[in-house]
Image (cartoon, grey):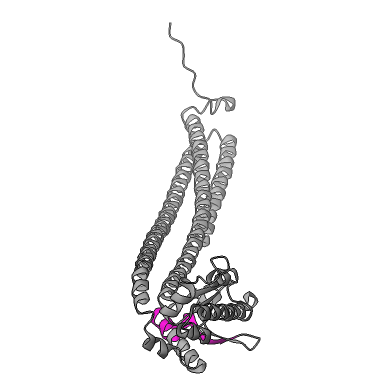
């Protein structure tokens, strides 16, 4: 593109130099004519030279105008190409953004549907919550119980998230390892699947109300201590985590008795309220699924945001290029306009010289002072 503008500038400069040389040549011819007014042969020769100069000027101007017109057509074609490219980019970007927004709306609908099903799931869980046989399978020795919880957590994560977005047994600089982390944007969501179930087992097995209340206090104290450990060991923003963590309770009936049906100390001192103050969120297998759906939606939202920024940056760059091209195109138009003005000036001067020579040829005795003057119209009457 820069080469085109240099070529156009060179054409304009050559045209101006050509006009000045022709004007100088005509001036010399006029001086020679003034010195030899009495020779008819000189007038004929001068007339021939004038016609030859006029033909050369017209041919040169026609050639330059043709070249300028071709360059202008080429520039117009390039401008149309850039405009078409910008329009296609805008249409493609708009379609991509609309598609991603539709996907996001569909995911939100799925999350709302899953949350709506939680009440029915809770009702069924309540009906089987006191199934001792099932509960005994869950309340195994601590090591086995912890291994099962981690295994359930890993399987659930692998069903919802791509492998690149979660890690099991994630290590911190302190040497502590959290059961899992989920990558959300540039940070991590820590998830702990260990849960103090020994005292919970005693609550289920106790026979009197007094024993139940005593074990509830002990169980609540153990859970709060575990929440404190999660908050201090795993919520580490300086190591890239968010300022909250998830406490995964691997059984719906345990979650129901511990969180949903927590009436030991009332709402102000309940386990859920205490956990939220420590920025630890208890989740069951079903509610954890809903949280993961929200995290997936967040990941898609981040991707849409990155793509939108990339598209806006590309459009901004194209807009700057278009503005630069428009400025240069206007400059070329100004040069063309100046060349046309020079052409008109040269044409008027040539016509004036032609008129003088015609006067000299037709009126050899005309005084020099009157050469070039328009004839005066005589008044009638």
Q: Is 38 rendered above or below residue 83?
A: above
Res 232 quadrant in image? bottom right
Find residue 305 and report its horizontal and vertical position in percent: 48, 65
The C terminus sits in image quarter: top left
Any part of residue 259 in sight: yes
Query: Looking at this rendering, what residue extends furthest in the top direction?
Result: 381
Q: How many marks?
A: 0
Q: Is 261 rendered above or below residue 163?
A: above
Res 233 quadrant in image? bottom right
Q: Nearer the viewer, residue 335 or 136?
A: 136
Q: Nearer the viewer, residue 292 or 105?
A: 292
Find residue 34 and report its horizontal and vertical position in percent: 58, 35
User: Is residue 373 found left or right of 69 in the rendered image?
Assistant: right
Say which residue appears at 63% left-offset and 89% top-offset.
Answer: 175
> Per the image, is 164 magenta?
yes
**Which range of residues does the magenta coloring cover?**
154-171
Say which residue appears at 53% left-offset and 48% top-offset.
Answer: 335
Find residue 374 and report its horizontal and vertical position in percent: 50, 24
Q: Is 128 rendered above or below residue 337?
A: below
Any part of residue 161 in sight: no
Find residue 219 and report its horizontal and vertical position in percent: 55, 80
> Per the image, is 168 magenta?
yes
Q: Nearer the viewer, residue 40 or 207?
A: 207
């Amino acid at each position: 593109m820069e080469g085109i503008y240099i070529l156009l500038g060179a054409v304009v400069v050559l045209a101006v130099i050509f006009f000045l040389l022709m004007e100088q040549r005509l001036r010399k011819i006029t001086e020679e004519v003034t010195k030899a007014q009495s020779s008819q042969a000189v007038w004929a020769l001068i007339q021939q030279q004038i016609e030859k100069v006029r033909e050369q000027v017209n041919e040169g101007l026609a050639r330059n105008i043709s070249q300028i017109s071709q360059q202008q057509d080429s520039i117009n074609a390039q401008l149309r190409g850039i405009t078409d490219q910008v329009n296609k980019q805008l249409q493609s970007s708009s379609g991509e953004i609309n598609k991603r927004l539709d996907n996001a709306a569909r995911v939100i609908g799925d999350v709302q549907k899953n949350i709506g099903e939680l009440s029915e799931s809770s009702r069924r869980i309540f009906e089987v919550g006191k199934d001792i046989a099932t509960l005994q399978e869950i309340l195994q020795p601590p090591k086995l119980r912890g291994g099962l919880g981690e295994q359930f957590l890993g399987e659930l994560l692998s069903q919802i998230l791509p492998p690149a977005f979660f890690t099991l047994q994630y290590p911190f600089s302190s040497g502590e390892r959290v059961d899992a982390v989920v990558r959300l944007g540039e940070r991590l969501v820590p998830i702990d699947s260990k849960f103090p179930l020994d005292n919970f087992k005693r609550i289920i097995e106790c026979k009197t109300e007094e024993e139940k209340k005593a074990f509830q206090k002990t169980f609540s104290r153990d859970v709060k201590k575990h929440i404190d450990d999660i908050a201090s060991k795993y919520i580490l923003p300086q190591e890239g985590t968010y300022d909250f963590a998830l406490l995964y309770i691997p059984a719906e009936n345990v979650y129901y008795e511990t969180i949903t049906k927590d009436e030991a100390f009332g709402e102000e001192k309940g386990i859920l309220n205490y956990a939220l103050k420590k920025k630890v969120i208890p989740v069951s297998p079903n509610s954890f699924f809903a949280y993961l759906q929200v995290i997936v939606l967040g990941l898609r939202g981040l991707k849409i945001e990155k793509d939108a920024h990339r598209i806006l940056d590309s459009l901004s760059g194209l807009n700057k290029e278009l503005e630069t091209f428009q400025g240069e195109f206007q400059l070329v138009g100004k040069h063309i306009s100046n060349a046309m003005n020079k052409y008109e000036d040269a044409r008027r001067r040539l016509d004036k010289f032609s008129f003088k020579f015609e006067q000299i040829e037709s009126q050899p005795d005309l005084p020099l002072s009157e050469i070039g003057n328009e004839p005066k119209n005589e008044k009638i009457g």
